[in-house]
Image (spheres, grey):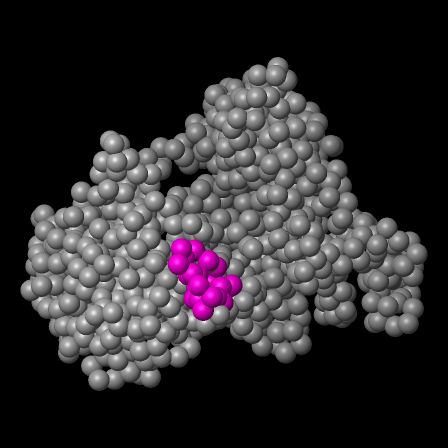
Amino acid sequence: MISPSPVLSIQNLKTFFYTREGVAKAVNGVSFSISKGEILGVVGESGCGKSMTAFSILRLVPAPGKIVSGQVLFDQQDLLTLSWSRMRQIRGDRISMIFQEPMISLNPAFSIGYQLTEALCVHRKISRLEARQRAIEMLGMVEIPNPEKRINDYPHQLSGGMRQRAMIAEALLLNPDVLLADEPTTALDVTIQAQVLDILYRLTQEMRTAILLITHNLGIVAESAARVVVMYAGKVVEEGPVKDIFEAPAHPYTQGLLKSVPMPGQSRGRDRQDLYEMKGIVPSLFQLPPGCAFHPRCPYAKDSCFQEEPVGSTISPGHSVLCWLYP
Amino acid sequence: MVWRRLLRNRIGVIGALFILANFLVAIFAPWIATHDPLKIDIQNQGAPPSSSFLFGADEYGRDIFSRVIFGSRISLYISIFSVLFALGGGVIFGAMAGYYRGWMENLIMRFMDAIMSFPAILLAIGILAVLGPNLYNVVLALGVVYLPRFARIVHGSVLSLREKEFVEASVAMGNSDWIIISRHILPNCTAPLIVQTTASLAYAILAESALSFLGLGAPPPAPSWGNILSDARNFMMDNAWMTVFPGVAITLAVLGFNLFGDALRDALDPRMK
Amino acid sequence: MLTYIVKRIFYLLPTLFLVAVIVFLLIHLIPGDPALIMLGQEAKPEAVQAIRKELGLDQPLPVQFALWMGNVLRGNFGTSIHSKIPVIQSIRERFPVTFVLTTLAVLFSLLIALPSGILAAVYQNTGKDYLIMLATVLGVSIPGFWLGLMGLLIFSVHFGWLPSTGYVAIWEDFGEGMKYMLLPSVTLGLFMAAVVARMTRSSMLEVFRLEYVTHARAKGLSEWSVINKHALKNAFAPTLTTIGIQYGMLLGGAVVTETVFSLPGLGKYLVVSISMRDYPVVQGCILFVALVYVLINLIVDLLYGYFDPRIQYQ
């Protein structure tokens, strides 16, 4: 499913991990696209391969992982075929990434000013002084108070929310085309989450940056994403506009995910409902079930689900699903 | 489970074999040596290696091969007993400091810090300077120098374990302090203690040979490897062989403990799968 | 930052006190009568009495300690029994040699150890790594003084490239001085090089697993920058502590090295004094070296704050 004028397009990406215990198929044939200025949510439980997909885009897959096949089309080139030095030019400049835990993803030994200006000086030929000015401006735009003072601080001197905002500032400083946001708010308090997300959206709207919003939190996807990709065991099981996915989820996994979100008042009153639990657990990536990886937990599993991997089908424009329930 | 991990590490096995060889040589020295290591034979002064003098002879005509073989006894004796001393003392002081806390902890650990403020060899030299060089004093001196390391390990372990419930339960049962310490707390720090023991054994062999070289270790004519090297130094111009073999012996002995100790540490590391 | 420095120094004082106590007690461990031992068994009773009075050995122990401490704090480290020269003067003459020796040894060892450790970490589990690890295990197993002897044997006796004994200060004539210092400092530094290489390797491996390294790569920084700037600065902190501790081993090892190479440093002076039973010298030298070691570790502690800024604010 290719959206109009995609800025980044992943085709059948496969990233496997070769370990002593066997081969873990972390990313097992993932395809999706993202357009300029679009916010694409990528949801799934831990271990479903969403982070690895992001790492694969930047070709930062740690050993013993390897990108086995597929294409990552960006700016009319396949990133997977680029030379290392060309790839370096793209990283941080055209495609940047922010990470889950800013305490450990910001280097504790350098001031945030240093870390912000570093990428700027490497990718653009400007002086440290000018880079510092821009960094201060950016810190102001992410609503960090007193940016001229704060720029000299070390990461441990900032609060969690400020650190994440500093990381956002760093990632957006070079005005990238795509921002890979790997669980950007998971490590933050709920009240701060809203703040950080707000800043993120505002800035990227202004700059028309495409965001790949990776999270397991359906709430923030519902609020801000335009389209959603649902991943399970290394594959995309459903993809579509947010409205469609949330109102009429097609894949049993997506349905289960949505049912699992507790609603206020759910457990009290006359129409009491127990918290919904999907039966079973996420399979080990070393021993995926045959056929459809979800079938052991699927309430609608039929024979074909045990035997063959399902083929993608389109339900409605822009909404596709990978399931034998749909022809 | 630890044993299996240990055996899988081939380097560690090699180290263990070295250590075993060291012990065997020391135990069977009288049968392996070709001559009496103390027998002086001026006629053969400075003889190069030959079929009768495998490593050659020193300036007194003593067979170097036999001296090196018997030297293994001295180095093993000193390293084992000094480390035992350090281990025993370290456990006692560390446990006392960690368990009773208060001024006792402060005093003991500060004292340990003070001992560790001296470069190891220097303190040993100082102690031997005043007590005089003989085997027992070397054991004492090295024991004192290594004691603080063991004390720190035990102290740390005791501190972290004393708050746990099984200790409280033991106290509630009315067990005496020492039973609690020995039965419940100490078994939990055996891993780092074992690693420190192998490391200290390696250091002790190096230290003993250095001290003997300086004339502060096993008194001559004892065939300590350090002594042999000290003699060799004066004779270096004429007979180079005296210098080579004792040093190789020291290196192999220490290597054994280091290789085995490394493998042991890897096997005991909970982070390795 | 200043409070951090002051706090560290303050924390040291009780330990320093105990160090002084230990050094003081050393003389009093001498079995028998120290005065008699120092002068020899045939000394006349009046001489023995005189020396006993001179060293204050007839006073009660705490008084002796107070007197001795008072002297030390004023820079009086005692007087040699044999040469009558104040110990502090001998120290002033000889310590520079030892200092140059140990400093050269540190520089040499860091020059070898840091790149090796980094290389071994980057090429983990490959041939390069195993080779370096093998070298480090050998490095900690080979006795330093034996290496010195072998070095002398090969480079001095056999090839005649380097002199075997003698000394020229490197600030007087760098070239000549280095000829005399090269072999001693290399053999002295080898053990430390092996230890620091290992420490650097394991520390770097720990850091490589951390997310800020991936983040640095994601910013498009060159691999060189990622390893040698971002990773190393963090990895260096624990390595620094190791360097400080190893300096102590160097100071001890210097005693042996100076003996092997006949360098006119503090170490050799100490050994010679021991054989002459010149206990005030022994005491003074040991105290001085211990103080130097404490100072080095303090400096290392303070430097730690530069490499790991989180420490400063505790």
Number of disc labels: 0
Q: Is residue A302 magenta?
A: yes
**In this orientation, which residue lies closer to the viewer: B97 or C245?**
B97
Range shown magenta = A284-306
Q: Height in image: C291 above or below C155? A: above
Left or right of A229 in this view: C189: right
Which residue: 9% across, 48% down? A146
* Residue B21 percent coordinates (x, y): 80, 58
B37 in relation to C128, above or below? above
Residue at image position (92%, 61%) is B34
Residue A298 visible in image: yes
> At 86% across and 50% down in the image, what residue appears?
B27
Residue A308 position, x and y percent, is 46, 72
User: Which one is in front, B189 or C92?
Assistant: B189
Say which quadrant the C terminus of chain B sits in: bottom right
Outermost top residue: B174
**B25 sits left or right of C305 in the view:** right
Quarter location, residue A223:
bottom left
Whole-percent x, y for residue B23 in the image:
80, 52
Judge whether B141 appears above or below C256 on screen: above
Q: Quadrant of residue B229?
A: bottom right
Residue visible at 32% across and 62% down in the picture? A251
Residue B26 x/y as whole percent: 83, 52
Q: Main secondary structure of the magenta part?
A: loop
Q: Is residue C251 visible?
A: no
Image position of C2 (left or right of B249):
left
Q: Magenta stretch: residue C103 in it?
A: no
Q: Choose between B100 and C246: the one closer to the eye.
A: B100
Side of A78 where C253 appears, left or right: right
